[in-house]
Image (spheres, rainbow, N blue to C red):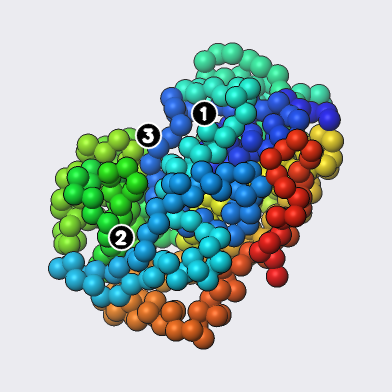
Amino acid sequence: MENKNILISGAGIAGTALAFWLKKFGCNPTIVEIAPKLREGGYAIDFWGAGFDVAERMGILPDLSNVDLKLSELTFVDENDKRRGGMNYRKIIKWMNGRAFTLLRSDLAKTIYKNLDKDIEIIFDDAISKIEQNENEVLVTFKNGNTRSFDLVVGADGLHSNVRNMVFGDEAQFEKYYGYYTASYTIPNPKGDKDFSMFNVPRKQVALYPTNKNTSAVFYIFASSDKLTYNHHDIEEQKQILRNEFKNSGWKCTDLLAEMDAAPDFYFDVVSQIKMTNWSKNRVALVGDACDCPSLLSGQGSTLAMVGAYILAGELKNANGNFKVAFEQYQTIFKGFIDDKQLLAQKFAKQFVPKSKFGIWLRNVVVGLMFLPFVSKLLIKQFTDKLKLKDYTIEGTSCQPGIANTRLN
Ligand SMILES: Cc1cc2nc3c(=O)[nH]c(=O)nc-3n(C[C@H](O)[C@H](O)[C@H](O)COP(=O)(O)OP(=O)(O)OC[C@H]3O[C@@H](n4cnc5c(N)ncnc54)[C@H](O)[C@@H]3O)c2cc1C
């Protein structure tokens, strides 16, 4: 196989999943991550569909099952914490034949990381500052001043991708803003509260749920018709935006905001999608949110990042490292599927957080109706990914041929 020395920018979900598969397929991946260690924090994700199938092929389902939050119900509450509706998680998981988890993003990231081959070089606390490519190599300069040569570079550095900015151009060309901001962090849960509650006021939503570590996670979304201007590196400024949005919202918001400063893992970002015509340029490609972010509106950002990583690594293997063929195939196989996911999320965007009291009431009623048998039958179809995953596995990997494509229709 040619072009085996591959630099991956970003040790998030896509970056670590890509390194996992590249190593399995005989490549020599290196990861560079800007954070000093693997990043913690983030929301709970619903983990199902093609990403679940990829996790199965990685052999990490038992580990993921151990960190499954095993939530039983999402309860919609009013300002007095009184139940106004809800969503039965157990039933949804049953609809999916048990092939679904609810995981903290950080637990998924840690699980993939823990399962990486120990020979993979991972450089923390550094980033790419310059990329120059020619016919034979990519010359990469790092922020620490080192310059190294790689055969290929993959940007797996998220929604605000550094590699994309350097090689493909400014983020504004590719970003589609959907009118929301999101934030999350964890707080102590000394009493071991088990409830997963969601509270809404028009245009704002806050959810609180237990993690498996004597903490609870708080997750906010608020609508903003205009994009906000703030410094992406200034966490204090982001916290102040959140305080201003939720300080008069009622329910437990005052207490939850008071605990924000002590949180070790504050996360704040815009809810946007990334739409690009081309996911590669010569020897540089993108994967995950960097090229195809579907946003939290899709509920599948992390699982899709894993699928993209699997296909990209698999196509490189199938093409014996011929990156031109592999990058083209990767996009041909995956882009239509992603376009559909992005479109679905886009259609859902306006209703994602109800904008009025009537909208909140209607949401509670409609979610209740979902569990009527004839409606749930229709919904199950929505929970089935129609992507036919190739089996790229080779002898010596932990993957078992035959478990592939179990969810196809
Ligand atoms: C800490 C964290 C919390 C998150 N919480 C939420 C959430 O609450 N809601 C939500 O919708 N989405 C959240 N996300 C985004 C979500 O994880 C992704 O949408 C999804 O998992 C796709 O994964 P990805 O690997 O493409 O991107 P990400 O998971 O975002 O990973 C990108 C990685 O690249 C690293 N990186 C960034 N810039 C550079 C650089 N210049 N050089 C090297 N590395 C770089 C980041 O530190 C990160 O580790 C969060 C992401 C992170 C990193």
Label 2: few (<14), some (14–19) or many (≥20) C-alpha neighbours in 10 Å: some
Residue ID for mark 1? 33
Q: Which mark is residue 244?
A: none
Tell us which disc is closer to us: 1 or 2.
Answer: 2
Label 1, label 2: how far apart the Cα atoms are: 32 Å
- Name the secondary structure under disc 1: strand
The residue lying at 75 percent from left, 35 percent from top is: 396
Q: Is residue 118 left or right of residue 160?
A: right
Q: Position of residue 351 (x, y in %)?
A: 41, 71
Write down the quadrant of residue 21 in the picture: top right
Residue labelled 1 has its Cβ within 8 Å of some atom of ligand 1: yes
Q: Nearer the viewer, residue 279 or 266?
A: 266
Q: Position of residue 107 (x, y in %)?
A: 44, 42
Label 3, label 1: how far apart the Cα atoms are: 16 Å
The residue lying at 83 percent from left, 42 percent from top is: 318
Residue type of the residue flagged with mark 2: Phe
Residue ID for mark 2? 196
Q: Nearer the viewer, residue 53 or 284?
A: 53
Residue type of the residue flagged with mark 1: Glu
In this view of the protein, can residue 164 be seen by the observer? no
Q: Position of residue 148 (x, y in %)?
A: 66, 17
Considering only vertical position in the picture, is 111 above or below 337? above
Q: Nearer the viewer, residue 35 or 133?
A: 35
Write down the quadrant of residue 3 in the picture: top right
Residue ID for mark 3? 233
Tell us which disc is closer to us: 2 or 3.
Answer: 2
Considering only vertical position in the picture, is 20 above or below 130? below
